[in-house]
Amino acid sequence: MRIRIVDTFTDRPFTGNPAGVLILDSDTFADDDRLQRIAMEVNLSETAFAHPLPPGGEADWALRWFTPATEVDMCGHATLATAHVLHTTGAATGTVRFAARCGILASDTRPDGAITLDFPTSPLTPEATPAGLAAALGAEPLSVQDTGPHIGDLLVELSDEATVRGLTPDIARLADVSRRGVIVTAAAADPARGYDFVSRGFFPRVGIDEDPVTGSAHTALAPFWSARLGRDDLTGLQASARSGLVRTALRGDRTLLTGNAVTVIDGELLTSL
């Protein structure tokens, strides 16, 4: 069984967000415990498993994602990685449709290699700042939004880009204030640098202290910043140590996420599923 490590939302190795990808030959997934153990062994923020579906249905591939600790409902960067592997290996061409826990997702790969994902827009609901959130972050929120059922994060607006970049949160305390994690964000200090907003993502409840570049978070960041900036097409910089750019296009109840990807490791899983 081939296993690949793909860096996503970047065109340079060792930046962006790495994901494990296993394209399965069978028409079913292995049992959940086996998939979880493989994801634990890969030990990246997400490992994606995909298998082909019969032709003529609403989707072409079944897709699941696992962190080292649990399965998740929606993941952007591992979907980008899977689409990249399918296209670079010739297993798929054109638009690819995935059946996942959050519904039908699609990817479209351009001739230059850029991949656009079609994801559901996360519904945002303002809420009061949870007790302990400011102390856990080490910064005072300007606003807090719940991001709905599929990603289950808190979207937290902070005062400026420097505050987002400078955070050193108490990760253990953050685990007590959200269902999945906390996304912090602020407007770009200088949009001329090529991005409109910055973010960082902390997900201790699913075994990820800080995620390098979180595609699913941008399904919430896109409507949040589009409403404030008055534009539907934006670029976000996730300001982790590895960093990466996500181009977002808000299309009502769907959000398009565009980025690049590069395969950095191509190996073999020396045990059967």
Image: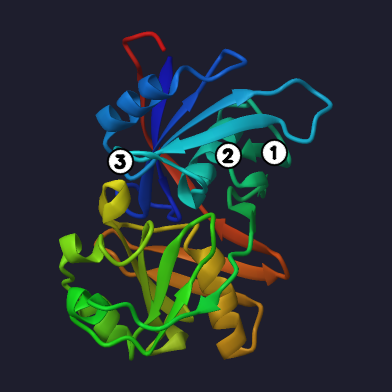
Distance between the alpha carbons at the discs numbered 3 and 1: 24 Å
Mark closer to the chain start, 3 or 1: 3
- Looking at the picture, does residue 161 appear above or below residue 50? below
- In the rendering, which numbered label is found on residue 44? 3
Counting labels gives 3
Local secondary structure at mark 3: loop
Q: Is residue 33 left or right of residue 174?
A: right
- In the rendering, which numbered label is found on residue 96? 1
- Looking at the picture, does residue 31 appear above or below residue 166? above
| Residue type for callout 1 | Val
- Looking at the picture, does residue 172 appear above or below residue 129? above
Rendering quarter of residue 226: bottom right
Judging depth in this view, the residue of 156 and 17 nearest the camera is 156
| Residue type for callout 3 | Leu
- Looking at the picture, does residue 40 appear above or below residue 181? above
Which residue is rendered at x = 28% and y = 58% of the image?
Answer: 242
Local secondary structure at mark 2: helix
Q: Residues within 10 Å of mark 2 (few under 14, many from 20)?
A: many
Residue 47 in picture, x, y percent from top left = 40, 36
Local secondary structure at mark 1: strand
Residue 202 in picture, x, y percent from top left = 30, 62
Judging depth in this view, the residue of 189 and 30 nearest the camera is 30
Mark closer to the chain start, 2 or 1: 2
Identify the residue position indicated by label 2 in the image. 83
Distance between the alpha carbons at the discs numbered 2 and 1: 7 Å
Marks 2 and 1 close (CB-CB < 8 Å): yes
Q: Residues within 10 Å of mark 1 (few under 14, many from 20)?
A: some
Distance between the alpha carbons at the discs numbered 2 and 3: 18 Å
Residue 45 in picture, x, y percent from top left = 33, 45
Residue 37 in picture, x, y percent from top left = 31, 25
